[in-house]
Amino acid sequence: MKTESIVFAVAGMIFGVILGWVIGAQQEGNRAVPAAVAAPAEGQPAARQAPPLDEGRVQSLMTIIKSDTKNAGAVVELANTYFDAERYPDAIKWYEEGLGLDPKNPDVSTDLGISYYYTGQTDRALKQFEHSLTIDPRHTKTMLNQEIVLAFGKQDLAGAEAAWKQVIALAPDSPEAQAARKGLEGITAAGHQGPGATPATGTTPGG
C-alpha cells in the first residue's frame, strides 16, 4: 500500500450484519486495498481470491535493494507490492525493514500496523499505531485505523467513538473525517449509546 497521500476509508460498519471492514487507499487516484472479512458461513459464497503478485515489480525492486540496501523508498515500495497482493507476512518483513531505514515515517508505521492486524495480531497492531502517534500525534490516518481495530478487534465501541470524533475535530473536511463519520453512523445504527454500551450480537470482527 502506498504511503504517500494514503487515505483510509471504512464503510459498512453496521454491527449484526457486517462481514468485515474495508480500507481504501489513495495514491495518485484511488486504488482498492484488501478487506478483512470473516470466513463465509455455510451456504455463502466463497471468499474472493487475493490479487496476483506483480512478480516483475518485485524482481525490479529486489535488484534495486541489492545494489542499494539503504534505499528506503524501494524497500517500502516492495512492502506495498506485497501488501497489495495480500501477502501480509512478506509485507510485514519489508515494512519493518523500511521503518528501520526511515523510523520517523508515520505512514510506514501505520501500514505495518494494518499488516499486523490482517495477520491476526490485534494487540501488536494497536501498539504499532501508538508508535505512529508518537511520531505524529495529529496523524489522522493512524487514528482512523487505530479505532477501526479497536472497534472490530477489541469491540471497544466507546473508544472508537471518542477517537473518531477527535479525527473529525482535527480535520473536519478530510477523507479521514468522512470515514470517521461513517464509523459513527455505523455505531449509531448498531444502537450504541455511549460509554458502557456493548456491541450488538452477531458481530464478526476481523483479527
Image: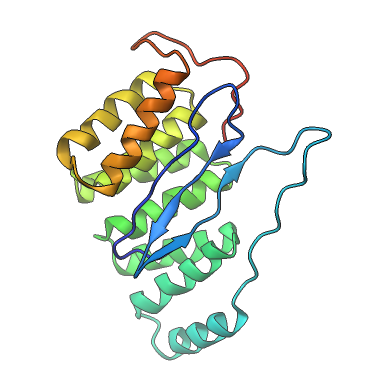
Task: Give the percent coordinates (x, y) of residue 206.
Answer: 57, 36
Which corner quadrant holds the C terminus?
top right
Q: Residue at x 33, y 24 (%)?
A: 161
Q: Where does the image place residue 36, in percent across and percent down from the top left?
A: 57, 44
Residue 130 visible, this angle: no
Q: Residue at x 17, y 43 (%)?
A: 171
Task: Kindly indicate the quadrant of the structure image that contains residue 147.
Answer: top left
One can see residue 71 in this view: yes
Horizontally, residue 126 falls left or right of residue 168, namely right
In this picture the colour scheme is rainbow
Left or right position of 177 against 95 = left
Give the quadrant of the N terminus.
Answer: bottom left
Q: Residue at x 83, y 33 (%)?
A: 42
Among the 4 quarters of the image, the one containing residue 183: top left
Q: Position of residue 124 (x, y in %)?
A: 46, 41
Q: Nearer the viewer, residue 102 or 205?
A: 205
Residue 72: x %, y % from top left: 34, 75
* Image position of 46 (left or right of 60): right
Q: Residue at x 61, y 34 (%)?
A: 19
Report which quarter residue 20 is drawn in.
Answer: top right
Say which of 26 and 92 sits in front: 26
Q: Is residue 183 above or below residue 106?
A: above
